[in-house]
Image (spheres, rainbow, N blue to C red):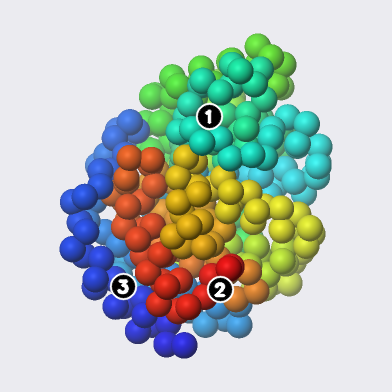
Amino acid sequence: MDYQKVIDRIHGELLELWGQGKVADYIPALAKVNPRQFGIALITLDGQEFLSGDAGVCFSVQSISKVFTLAMVTRHIGDGIWKAVGREPSGNPFNSLVQLEHEQGFPRNPFINAGALVVTDRLISLYPHPKDAILEFVRGLCGNDDIYYDKEIARSELDHADRNMALAYFMKSFGNIENDVDILLDVYCHQCAISMSCEDLARAFLFLCNRGTNPLNGEQVLTVSQAKRLGALMLTCGFYDESGDFAFRAGLPGKSGVGGGIAAYIPGNLSVTVWSPELNRHGNSLIGMEALERLTTDIGNSIF
Ligand code: GLN
């Protein structure tokens, strides 16, 4: 399979879709990003790398970080996390408050903001220096020590975190947040502001592609069963109220972020990350979703 040819062709074809989506602007620092960028990195489990467009440009991973924090917490407390957060698709926007009231502060899944806040809260309880621990974990996954928080984006999100604060306080009123909400929001806004390229992210997701073991260094990050579960959650919940549509179109476990990135993989085969900042109305990269649909169609391979 000539992956380079496939991704270069997709890159060329997608340029006609510029302008149909909109960059996230509820975090002012994200609104400053040049919308007309596109990158794709595809890395096979046997170590071949294929890059096209802006695959080396760093961007804000945003909600893709929710996979990293869930993996970290799972390593420590395993199934314990499911006492605090569910694992069903929400069918609601990522920052919705509505469902939480009906479900008494128990978020539907770890990838909507409410669920991710609970996961980060438990991470804070587990690690004395949570922000350092997150960076160390992500650097280890992709083998790049040059990964940092984008301080400007973290600050900008913290300054506009009213909705996430509301979610956290609301859950705390039900006893589902253990730590101080200001500390929780500081860590959460930093994890969302991790700056990585498509190439870094495609490497960082190789451990999931490889049943929990990082092929870059042989480290078992998760057990086979934990990796299976994380992938299942990405497939069913990774795109908020568009998760079904992404599964339908691309047929891959994946996770999106409002920075415009999408990390996805074919188990036992390859990891692929796309990035393009213009979002559709669900907060997922418009061109990124299209690129992954075309990729799995063109290569005739997905999880189905
Ligand atoms: N930092 C963003 C927020 O909490 C993450 C949302 C996303 O990427 N979908 O609103």
Secondary structure beneath dot 3 equals: helix
Q: Amino acid at mark 2?
A: Leu
Residue that lies at the very extreme toward the top in this rendered image: 173
What x and y, as percent, mark residue 178?
71, 22
- Quarter of the image where one finds residue 193: top left
What x and y, as percent, mark residue 97?
51, 21
Mark earlier in primary sequence (2, 3): 3
Q: Amino acid at mark 3?
A: Ile
For the residues bearing labels 3 and 1, Cβ distance under 8 angstroms:
no
What x and y, as percent, mark residue 104?
66, 17
**What is the distance, in whole Å, between disc 3 and disc 1 at their CAs?**
38 Å
Secondary structure beneath dot 1 equals: helix
Q: Amino acid at mark 1?
A: Asp
Q: Which residue is mark 1?
A: 186
Q: Residue at x 50, y 49 (%)?
A: 244
Q: Which residue is mark 2?
A: 270
Q: Which residue is mark 3?
A: 10
- In depth, the one of 265 and 56 nearer the eye is 265
Q: Residues within 10 Å of mark 1 (few under 14, many from 20)?
A: some
Secondary structure beneath dot 2 equals: strand
Q: Residue at x 63, y 29 (%)?
A: 107
Q: Residues within 10 Å of mark 3 (few under 14, many from 20)?
A: some
Q: Which label belongs to residue 253?
A: none
Indicate which label's residue lies in the foreground, 2 or 1.
2
Q: How many marks?
A: 3
Q: Residue at x 72, y 66 (%)?
A: 211
Where's the C terminus, which quadrant? bottom right
